[in-house]
Amino acid sequence: MSPFKKESLHMLTRPRATPALPTPPTFNFPTGDVTVLLSNVSDPDTTTRALASTSSLSIASPVWKKFLCPPWATDSTTPATSLDFTSDPLFAITLLLQVAHLQFRNIPSKLPYSQLLQVAILCDQYSCASLVAPWLDSWLSDEKPASKEDGKEGWLFIAWAFGRESVFEELAKKLVFEVKIGKNGKCLTKNGEVMPEPMPNEILESVLKIRAEIIEQLFRIPFTWLTNFEQSTKPLCLRNYDKEACDAMIYGSVARGIQKASLWPLTTSRNITLSIEELANVLKGIKIQILQEPRGKSVEWSHINCKTINMHFGVAKILDSVGNPVLDCHRLHMREQRGEVKDK
């Protein structure tokens, strides 16, 4: 009787054993001529050795080709006998090696977010996105909804690495609205976590540039309005009575709303760490209190028309003007990833 059958006889009399970890993917090309070193998940202090084909690796990746056949090599140069991949995620590098050696049997039709990101990072690192092109439609079949989930900002890199331009543009615009600044000056996600790395070249700089411009414009709405009250030598109230009280109530409504968001005193937009989305919600949430007409007086005594500030209109107009952070260099890179640009 096999050991599996023996154990099944005791399942009713003892606790179920802890499920074993999934078997890590394996790779080997028995007729290979170069050794590849891989990490060992069961024993991190050791490495796993496998054989690979120099020609297959050279065709798959220009980066691997340079390691194996350096263009600066001379006749006296000792040829490379091994490639060290121990710092790469085992699943992702094994998958790439399998595809490079036409070992397609165990290539999954779906990848969870974490593994998809690992593969994207290695495809960018080794310039071999075309290697996995036949599987992209399957792996990215749910990219539209999946890429918008909170906490999965790495989808921006996935879209960039695999040339998914429409998804990249949507996520970059979304990031403009959501990114905020931490106490140490680092970019934070909507959930307050440090922005994951790596990020596509120049995208964060472009996002932060647009964020700074929009934050400044939003900042100017309450700042300009409050400054008008502070610098005016006479009340701004439109009525001929209770002018000071009316001004004080409206000024206090705006100042209090800003204070609740820990933005008081308003001095400069550079000190604002909130995201565009958060600051816009603060401004739209400010409720202007209006001085009520005295009891028994007609509507002619009302100060309703003194409420000249319209937070919602001003905020909406600014948000509609938010620019696109995607640069020409991003579009060119994604065209190259899709194979639409001929080799230079």
Image (cartoon, helix red, strand yellow):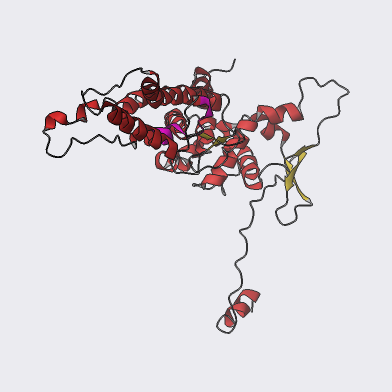
- Whether residue 278 is in magenta: the answer is yes
**Residue furthest bottom in the image:** 13
| Rendering quarter of residue 3 | bottom right
| Rendering quarter of residue 6 | bottom right
**Residue 16, image x and y in percent?**
58, 75
* The one of 115 and 223 positioned closer to us in this rendering: 223
Relative vertical location of residue 256 with respect to residue 216 in this rendering, above or below: below
Relative vertical location of residue 81 with respect to residue 75 in this rendering, above or below: below
**Which residue is found at the position 44% from the left and 37% from the top?**
259
* The one of 29 and 302 positioned closer to us in this rendering: 302
**Which residue is found at the position 34% from the left and 25% from the top?**
320
Side of 320 relative to 237 (left or right): right
* The one of 270 and 152 positioned closer to us in this rendering: 270
**Residue 324, image x and y in percent?**
43, 23
Relative vertical location of residue 130 with respect to residue 148 in this rendering, above or below: above
Do we see residue 339 in this rendering?
A: no
**Which residue is found at the position 58% from the left and 38% from the top?**
196
**Which residue is found at the position 34% from the left and 28% from the top?**
315
Quadrant where the N terminus is found in the figure: bottom right
Majority secondary structure of magenta residues: helix
**Residue 9, image x and y in percent?**
58, 82
Q: Which residues are magenta?
A: 270-280
- Whether residue 25 is in magenta: the answer is no
Side of 35 relative to 192 (left or right): right
Quadrant where the C terminus is found in the figure: top right
**Residue furthest top in the image:** 344
Do we see residue 18 in this rendering?
A: yes
**Residue furthest right in the image:** 76
**Residue 99, image x and y in percent?**
60, 40
